[in-house]
């Protein structure tokens, strides 16, 4: 289905670096993401070989590649063609055959086939302003079966506005000093200026209005990241 003309271009919001094949090749090392715990959590939540899992904002496939052996079908969705190309390359090398790569985003992905049992998203939702976050959550709800699980892990501010300067400065003081060791202060400052990190207490009513019940909410000590486990209840 063609999106209305007033929908945003999600590819334009991806960030030029995520569309650069050379940058993408180095992304895994810089991100340093270990999702062993997340995969174990999905398993504990009931993910099994009968299920469909949709990974929205799959990137280079760290979660998708680890979770695919646990489920029947895994759909890896990302706006970045270079990231999906690297994911497909890694899946072929590992002999994983149940991953389907789809170029798209929260607002453009069209789910095919049976409803999803699980939807997962890490470090992607903050690319959308709050109005579009709310629409994205409604679209996620529409592809999940009733009782299905939504797991979100994203930059989210779990503090009140008067605390912003103190907490953000503390966060910036804790990041890597050199690019080869991870995200640096200029990287994070750019994200804060140009992306759409929202407050956790604004996201929560959006989730509830999209027919989700929040079963678990975890706010990291830096109060700059949060993780939610939600169930579609209607």
Image (cartoon, helix red, strand yellow):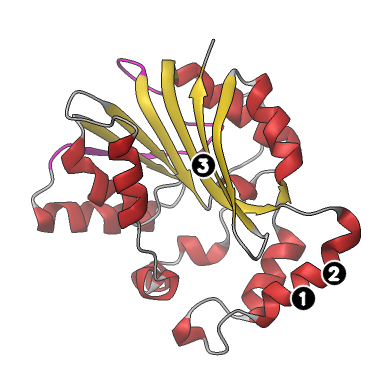
Q: Position of residue 50 (x, y in %)?
A: 19, 23
* Residue segment shown in magenta: 97-115
Who is closer to the viewer here, 117 or 127?
117
Q: Is residue 160 above or below residue 166?
A: above
Horizontal arrangement in the rendering, residue 211 relative to residue 78 (left or right): right
Check contact, mark 3 vs mark 2: CB within 8 A: no
Determine which residue is flagged by label 2. Answer: 165
**Mark 3 to mark 2 CA distance (whole Å):** 25 Å
Provide the secondary structure element on which disc 2 rests: helix
Q: Main secondary structure of the magenta part?
A: loop
Q: Residue furthest left?
A: 95
What residue is drawn where x is 67% and y is 79%? Answer: 186
Write down the quadrant of residue 70 in the picture.
top left
Mark 1 sits on what residue? 169
The reply to whether discs 3 and 1 touch (Cβ–Cβ < 8 Å) is no
Q: Which mark is residue 22?
A: none
Q: Is residue 185 above or below residue 47?
A: below
Check the image and report above or below for 221 versus 187: above
Label 1–label 2 contact, CB within 8 A: yes
- Residue 150: image x %, image y %? 47, 31
Q: Which residue is mark 3?
A: 152
Q: CA distance from mark 3 to mark 1?
A: 25 Å
Instruction: Name the quadrant of the C terminus.
Output: top right
Give the residue at the far bottom of this rendering: 178
Whether residue 2 appears in this view of the structure is no
Q: Earlier in the sequence, mark 3 or mark 1?
A: 3
> Which badge, 3 or 2, comes first in the chain's sequence?
3
């Amino acid at each position: 289905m063609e999106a209305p003309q007033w929908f945003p271009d999600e590819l334009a919001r991806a960030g030029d670096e995520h569309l650069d094949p050379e940058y993408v090749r180095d992304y895994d090392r810089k991100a340093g993401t270990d999702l062993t715990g997340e995969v174990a959590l999905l398993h504990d939540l009931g993910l099994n070989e009968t299920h469909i899992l949709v990974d929205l904002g799959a990137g280079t496939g760290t979660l998708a590649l680890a979770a695919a052996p646990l489920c029947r079908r895994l759909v890896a969705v990302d706006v970045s063609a270079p990231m999906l190309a690297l994911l497909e390359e890694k899946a072929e090398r590992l002999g994983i055959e149940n991953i389907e790569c789809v170029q798209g985003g929260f607002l453009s992905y069209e789910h095919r086939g049976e409803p999803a049992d699980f939807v997962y998203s890490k470090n992607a939702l903050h690319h959308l302003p709050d109005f579009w976050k709310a629409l994205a959550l409604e679209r996620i709800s529409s592809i999940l079966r009733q009782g299905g699980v939504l797991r979100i892990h994203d930059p989210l501010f779990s503090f009140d506005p008067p605390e912003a300067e103190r907490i953000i400065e503390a966060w910036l003081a804790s990041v890597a000093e050199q690019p080869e060791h991870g995200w640096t202060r200029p990287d994070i400052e750019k994200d804060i200026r140009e992306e759409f990190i929202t407050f956790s207490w604004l996201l929560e009513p959006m989730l509830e209005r999209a027919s989700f019940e929040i079963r678990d909410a975890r706010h990291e000590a830096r109060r700059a990241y949060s993780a939610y486990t939600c169930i579609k209840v209607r």
